[in-house]
Image (cartoon, helix red, strand yellow):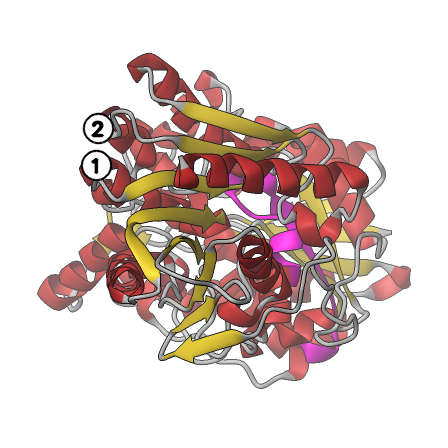
Amino acid sequence: MTVFILVSGVFTGPHVWDASAAALTGAGAEVHAVALTGLGGPGPGGGTDVDLETHIADVVAVIDAVGRADGREIVLVGHDYGVHPVLGAADRRAGSIARIICLDSGLPQDGVPALAAVPDQGVREQVLRAAGEGAREADAALPPPARDAWRLWGSTADVPDAALDRLTALASPQPLGTLLQPLELTGAAATVAMAGVLCTGNGASIAMVQARLDFGEPSLQALADPRVTFLELDTGHWPMLSDPAALAATLLRAAAGEGRRLTPRGATPAQPFLLDVPGTPRERHDNIDLYLPPGARGPLPAVVLVHGGPVPREARPTPRDWPALTGYARYAAAEGVVGVTLDHRLHSVADYGTAAGDVADAVGRVRADPRVDGDRIALWFFSGSGPLTADWMRRTPPWLRCLAAHYPVMAPLPNWGRLDSRFHPAEAVAHAGSLPLVLVRAGLETTAVAATVEEFMTAARTCGAAVEVVDVPNGHHDFETVDRTDESREAVQRAMRTVLRHLTA
């Protein structure tokens, strides 16, 4: 028999699992939803005596009470904040645990507090202020969110109104110590099999985790272990409320070891650009690379290609050397214009301001090059650089002849928290005027990213912005790499022709 021990996230108690627990029990599993101290369990809602170790002890107590007799296999499930006490308990009882399931959560690291995983920077600052002002007071706790503020903790997509009302009514203050105390791990749980269940409606996907693994992010390399599997749920951050039956079925699959395994970094060679383009040499200038047409004369228009992200600082090669971007740059050069790639510092969702400055500086230096026609520039943004388009739509300089967005993220994803309103393209598009906009849209985009594109398109239609759409009906995000089909090749060619038509008109 499989025994599920379920641990909920911030502000919540065992009640959130009711429907999924019933479905698991109906499938023959044994289920224990843990009542964490102060969150549906014994003890006060706050207080300096309630910290992460308190909650780890709560989970350990349930593990010890269940035992592992008669062939029962214990599976720990941690949702959101709940993964922190789950990992802490697994570290202390590794021999009793068959599997750990991280439900729409990150993978906490030794020495890092749960606060680091809170998606919204404003909330993190609120916690730090509260800690500074009253960490020694008996009621030191973060108040639960109002009904319309749960989205700052993750997407509430598909959650029925009644369930959201109940979530709000039963929410408890979160003791500050549970967010501020660093997680202490010995490494004992590294031998325990693990599964990640990602909620695509909240902005997570298996492809995104694989991409970050490929970037070389050190904290994720363990996820390529063959004992680690991944599954997806097409819903928001609260699947136990939005689709409890599907969650139960997915947890059963995860407990059985089903799911996709990630490819270790470097196991698959980087795919070359999907079109056969000339091997135009580059000129490297600080963080900018120029690809000039062979035998170019006189100042030429330029296409500046802006990579997505966030990209870890330690990622190698850096984005301007990615085959897709260098392929686009060489393709542009083959068509008689200057192709430009660059590296900018979008390393986290808090870095959009820094990245915007890097891009503006790079564009200024490109325009100043005597071989470039500074009055004919196209900017082409990819993926997570989509929010950076807002600056250029708001001020639309006369030399900007076209702005392209390629399978873009056009609004903050739900698991990002709040993003400065400066970087909301749907709000900026009303200022774009007659600036030609080109949007390359992947038909098989993830739910969360597709929603941001639709938000932008709705705003663009409302204000009558000049948006030309290049659709790739059977294309995924990053289709040049993952969908090496004739449809993808034709889409790349259409996109380049469209951008160059506006650039050279």
Q: Amino acid at mark 2?
A: His
Residue 337's label in the rendered image is: none
Instruction: Tell which of 388 and 3 is nearer to you.
Output: 388
Q: Judge whether residue 228 is colored magenta.
A: no
Q: Residue furthest bottom?
A: 186
At x 72% / y 43%, what residue is drawn?
489
Q: Which residue is mark 2?
A: 431
Residue 273 percent coordinates (x, y): 69, 59
Residue 327 percent coordinates (x, y): 62, 60
Q: Judge whether residue 192 is colored magenta.
A: yes
Local crowd size for mark 2, using a 10 Å CA cut-off: few (<14), some (14–19), many (≥20): some
Residue 92 percent coordinates (x, y): 61, 78
Residue 116 makes an appearance in the image? yes
Where 465 falls versus 478 (above or below)? above
* Residue 75 sits in quarter: bottom right
Local crowd size for mark 1, using a 10 Å CA cut-off: few (<14), some (14–19), many (≥20): some
User: Helix, strand, or loop for circle 2?
Assistant: helix
At x 35% / y 68%, what residue is drawn?
345
Q: Quadrant of the C terminus?
A: top left
| Cα separation between marks 2 and 1 | 5 Å
Whether residues under marks 2 and 1 lie with C-beta atoms below 8 angstroms apart, the answer is yes
Residue 1 percent coordinates (x, y): 87, 51
Q: Amino acid at mark 1?
A: Arg
User: Helix, strand, or loop for circle 1?
Assistant: helix
Q: Residue furthest right?
A: 71
Q: Which residue is mark 1?
A: 394
In the displayed structure image, the side of residue 12 where residue 206 appears, left or right: right
The mark nearer the N terminus, 2 or 1, is 1
Segment colored magenta: 190-210
